[in-house]
Image (cartoon, rainbow, N blue to C red):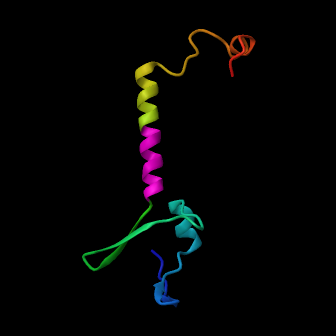
Amino acid sequence: MSRVTVGKWGKSLAIRVPLDIASASGLSEGEEVEIQSKDGDLVIHRPEAHARADALKAAQELLERTGGPTLGGLSIRDLINEGRR
């Protein structure tokens, strides 16, 4: 757990996120986050990270159900030779 000091940024208050915390959570500069107050605590959510995890899970489930990606028995070379890209 890290301790940080709340500062002022214009008419708002600001908290700097230490690099080790940002790295551990995958937070990057310019990323939008959701912030809320819950029982007197601040809670920060990364909606893009959750969406990415949900998409990866859905893709994995799809691959498991379909048996993996296929090209209908054709190689990429066959498709190129047929003029498809």
Residue at point 49% right, 88% down?
5
Q: Compare residues 3 and 83 and report the one nearer the observer.
A: 83
In the displayed structure, would residue 83 be above or below residue 58? above
Farthest residue to the front: give it. Answer: 83
Extent of the magenta region? 47-57
Residue at point 42% right, 38% down?
57
Residue 21: x percent and y percent? Answer: 52, 69
Does residue 6 appear anywhere in the picture? Answer: no
Does residue 3 appear anywhere in the picture? Answer: yes
Taking 38 as reference, is 16 left or right?
right
Taking 34 as reference, is 21 left or right?
right
Residue at point 68% right, 18% down?
84
In the displayed structure, would residue 47 be above or below residue 54? below
Magenta-span inclusion, residue 40: no
Residue 79: x percent and y percent? Answer: 68, 14
Q: Is the magenta stretch mostly helix, strand or loop?
A: helix
Residue 75: x percent and y percent? Answer: 67, 13
Q: Which quadrant would the C terminus be assigned to in this image? A: top right
Residue at point 58% right, 67% down?
30
How many marks the image carries: the answer is: 0
Farthest residue to the left: give it. Answer: 39
Specify the quadrant of the image occupied by residue 20: bottom right
Specify the quadrant of the image occupied by residue 69: top right
In the displayed structure, would residue 70 be above or below residue 43? above
Residue 58: x percent and y percent? Answer: 41, 36
Q: Which quadrant would the N terminus be assigned to in this image? A: bottom left
